[in-house]
Amino acid sequence: MKTILAKLRLYWPLTKSLQTGLLLSTGLAGFMSARSPFAPWFDFAGLAVSLFLAITGSTIINMWYDRDIDAVMNRTHHRPLADGRIKPAEAFRLGLVLSTLGVGLALTMSPLYGLIVFAGLFFDVLVYTLWLKRRTSWSIVWGGISGAMPILAGRAFAIGRMDGIGLLLALAVLFWIPTHILTFAMLYSDEYKLAKIPTFPSAYGLQFTRLTIAVSSVLAALAILVAAVLIGMQSGSLRLLVVLSTGLMFLATVTIFRPSEKVNFGLFKYASVFMLSAMLLLSI
Amino acid sequence: MKITLLDRLLLLATGLLAAWQIAIGIDRLSTLPIIAYTVGFGCLLVAALLIIILGFEALDSPVVVIVSTLIPLSLSLGLVWEHLAAIRNFYLLFAVSGFLAIIITRSIPLKNRLPVLVLAAIHGFAGITIFLLPFFLVFTGRAAPGFALVGVGGALIGLVGLQLSFLKAGRPILSRKTILLILPGLLLVTTAAFVLGFSAV
């Protein structure tokens, strides 16, 4: 028992639990946004399990591939793959098994849902991590697209097809992802340079990066608001969403006109709180 | 001054109460009070979130003066619109022009006392309205006794807003340290008084 617990503790950081949790919440919110009154509990449970497996699996494969970068960067050098506590082959096998289980379960639940989950994994691992991350700073677009797949998948699973609302929700997550990635790129720009990873701050400067973060935050808020209106969200929840969106837009404006490291990091944190709140509001 | 865990918890509770009021507590009202209360409680919610995330340094922003005036102005507008139909249009005009006056006097660098006077007059009048109107309505039997809590909240928010506004205007009534020490608790008690008071109508 002790060995299993120790192993779990060792492997847990590979799941990037916060990021995985947030992406999982988008998938569940996409499902709940359909407000299907007859959705059985096992559909919801299956969605949660398959998404968790697929997201965790792809995250572990990414960390397996990026272990050389992680070892160079101060922020990530303590990760169990980077500092050698976990054997790379073992982690790769685990990532592959979890991904296969996740996509396999998703495909058995619904071919369309499974296809979207697979697309998310494909864009994340193959396009973003393996192909583009070390070549161009614009790889974040593909990181964003892969991050947008859980919410699209969740909604498609609930209604049995892809619709405009699902695409709008996916667009919102797509615009939210740069806030996350670019904030870290600014905070740790020296470390990314050391690891030879092209980033927006190194390619276009801090001012352009801040502007990109601000614009994408505003677009994320607008996309969520439009989607919420189209879904027919209750007026009270909609009011709350408008207030939270206004806060996000206010902070995004501050980062352009009164930039500072603290405000930038504040925007990143607020955007995460906003996204989680928006997902909760979409679900009720 | 560094923000503590207790401060964060108090502010989180404030934000949750304000969020509840926006989403559920004002559903039965007409359009303008809904907008006014959404602005007021929305400012409380976003302010609480920003202080949790950025710490008390968030209060160093020049927009604090404007936001701390927007809260009593919008809440008093909602109250007047709901309960004093005879002067609702006049009060709407006062609220809009007062808000614009504060923005203008804060944006243009003026060396005289005009910005402080404008701030004190508008903030003070809005604060007195939220403080007195609920008590008046309760004493005249036009509202349930619990509605007086809105007046209590009005007195407290007036206190918070004036402290912050005058701190930002460079003429603090209490020291910065004292204001920051009591701010999270005061915001929570204020918001709780509003939420309980509005639910008592």
Image (cartoon, coloured by chain):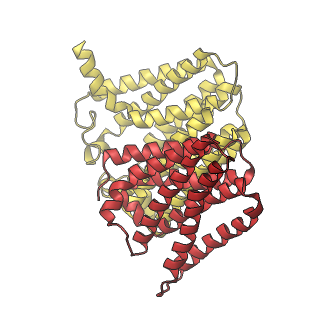
Chain colours: A yellow, B red
Residue for point 49% across, 38% down:
A124
Q: Nearer the viewer, residue A53 or A136?
A: A53
| Corner quadrant of residue A191 | bottom left
| Corner quadrant of residue B21 | top right
Query: How far across and down, in percent of the image, does residue B185 sit?
Result: 39, 49
Query: How far across and down, in percent of the image, does residue A235 sit?
Result: 69, 42
Residue for point 65% across, 51% down:
B137
Query: How far across and down, in percent of the image, does residue A243 sit?
Result: 59, 51
| Corner quadrant of residue B197 | top right
- A91 up-or-down from A38: above or below: below
Position of the C terminus of chain A, as image quadrant, is: top right
Query: How far across and down, in percent of the image, does residue B12 sit?
Result: 43, 44
* Left or right, residue A97 beside residue B136: left
* Left or right, residue A198 beside residue A256: left
- Residue B50 visible in this rendered orientation of the protein: yes
Position of the N terminus of chain A, as image quadrant, is: top left
- A278 up-or-down from A244: above or below: above
**How many discs appear?**
0
Residue for point 65% across, 32% down:
A33
- Residue A121 visible in this rendered orientation of the protein: no
